[in-house]
Image (cartoon, rainbow, N blue to C red):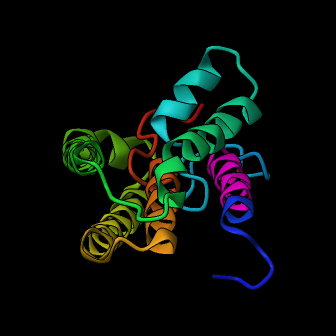
Amino acid sequence: MPVGLSPPQLRIALAIVVCAIAAHALGLLGDGFPTPRSPYPIALTVIMFLGVPALVPAVLMGLLFFVSSRRALNVAPKFSWAAALALSIATLASIAYFIAGWHYGVQYQGRPFVLICAWMSALAATALWVVFVLCWRKQARFGSLMFYFLLFSWLSTYAFPYFGEAP
């Protein structure tokens, strides 16, 4: 754990980083359309299509991380079955999303975009499962916090990139 940050401070800092990751994924820093650097995650993009400023869904992801990761600071953090179920559903849904949207992704965003997003999603999901299994056994506070950080970072970037016409 970084020197000088207490676990609650680290959790707050990671929530801010999740906000920044989500904001960058939504093109807030200049892309303006889906690219491998800013894949425009579908759930956050739909919120923007409703006229909500891009910063709002980004902050929402940070707040969801903050609320969801509260168990990570327990004396003996333990993953609930809900965490296992959520990771399983998110992984299967991401796979299904890539299979169902592959054609549209290639048509509207191009094959390189879809391939890069698919590889990044697969790497992130694999890392999540490795951290989950390791933390399930050892129940480490820092490992649990990293699991939630990786989960929300993946969900706000490559888990469900935008495959439609450029917004």
Count of numbered labels shown in the rendering:
0
Residue 127 in percent (x, y) is at 35, 73
Name the quarter where the C terminus is drawn. top right
* 166 with respect to 150 (left or right): right
Q: What residue occupies the far bottom of the structure in this picture?
A: 3
* 21 with respect to 141 (left or right): right
Residue 138 in percent (x, y) is at 31, 77
What residue span does the magenta drawing correspond to? 11-26
Residue 160 in percent (x, y) is at 39, 44
* 6 with respect to 131 (left or right): right
Q: Residue at x 43, y 34 (%)?
A: 164
Name the quarter where the N terminus is drawn. bottom right
Q: Residue at x 22, y 47 (%)?
A: 81
Q: Is residue 166 magenta?
A: no
Q: Residue at x 23, y 41 (%)?
A: 93
Q: Is residue 24 magenta?
A: yes
Q: What residue occupies the far top of the structure in this picture?
A: 50
* 147 with respect to 94 (left or right): right
Task: Let me know if residue 53 appears in the view.
Answer: yes
Q: Residue at x 69, y 53 (%)?
A: 24
The picture quadrant where one finds residue 136 is bottom left
Task: Let me know if residue 156 appears in the view.
Answer: no
Residue 119 in percent (x, y) is at 34, 69
**Residue 71 drawn above or below residue 131:** above
Q: Looking at the magenta stretch, what is its main secondary structure?
A: helix
Front-most of residues 56 and 143: 143
